[in-house]
Amino acid sequence: MSLKVFDLLCDQGHVFEGWFASADNFESQQTRGLLSCPVCDSHHVTKKLSAPRLNVSHIRNESAQDAAQRGAGGASAPVAAPSGAQMAQFQAEMLKRLRHVIRNTENVGPRFADEARRMHEGEAQERAIRGTATAQEQEELVEEGIAVMPIPDFLDDERLQ
C-alpha cells in the first residue's frame, strides 16, 4: 500500500507530517476532528501546500568516498534508493525505538517544564523525563538552552489507557 505524506500546519504555526492511506483518508480524519498537532494538541489542522512527490528512484547517490575512489581510478557501486518495503521496515523500527524511549522515561506530567529546569540547573538528578508543557513553556525551555522534543500522544501507551 502506498501512503500519502502531507505537511500539516496547525493554527499555532506548528508544521508536522501526517501519513494517510489516501487524500480522502486525510479529508475524512480532518472532518471527524481526529487530527491534532503533536506540539500543542490543536485540532485546527490544515494541509500545507507542498511540491509534488517526484519519483527519482532511478537517480543513484554516491558518497564522497565513492567519488574519491573513482577519482583514484577505483570503481564505484551505485547506491539505490530504499524500496517501499525497506522504508516501511525503517518506519516500524523507528516507532519501536521511540516507544522504547517513552517506556523508559519518568512521566512527570504537567510538572515537565519545572522539572526540566531543575535538572538543567543541577537542582534535581538528571534523568529521562516526559510530560506535558504548553507551547509557550516549550519555547521558553528551548530559549533557555534546554533540549525538548514533542512526542505525539498516540505513541504514549499511558495516555491511551
Image: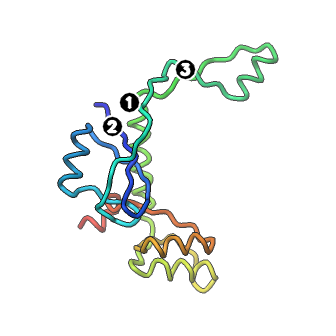
Residue 70 placement (x, y as % from top left):
75, 17
The numbered disc on residue 59 is 3
Residue at image x 53%, y 22%? Answer: 80
Residue density around tag 3, few if under 14, some if 14–19, many if 20 or more, within 10 Å: few
Residue 86 placement (x, y as % from top left):
43, 31
Task: Kindly identify the amino acid type of the residue bearing the numbered disc 2.
Answer: Lys
Residue 96, placed above or below residue 118: above
First of labels 3, 2 by sequence position: 2
Residue 59, placed above or below residue 93: above
Q: CA distance from mark 1 to mark 3?
A: 19 Å
Residue density around tag 2, few if under 14, some if 14–19, many if 20 or more, within 10 Å: some
The numbered disc on residue 4 is 2
Residue density around tag 1, few if under 14, some if 14–19, many if 20 or more, within 10 Å: few
| Of residues 24 and 79, the one drawn nearer to the viewer in this rendering | 24
Q: CA distance from mark 2 to mark 1?
A: 15 Å
* In this rendering, position of residue 43 left or right of residue 67: left
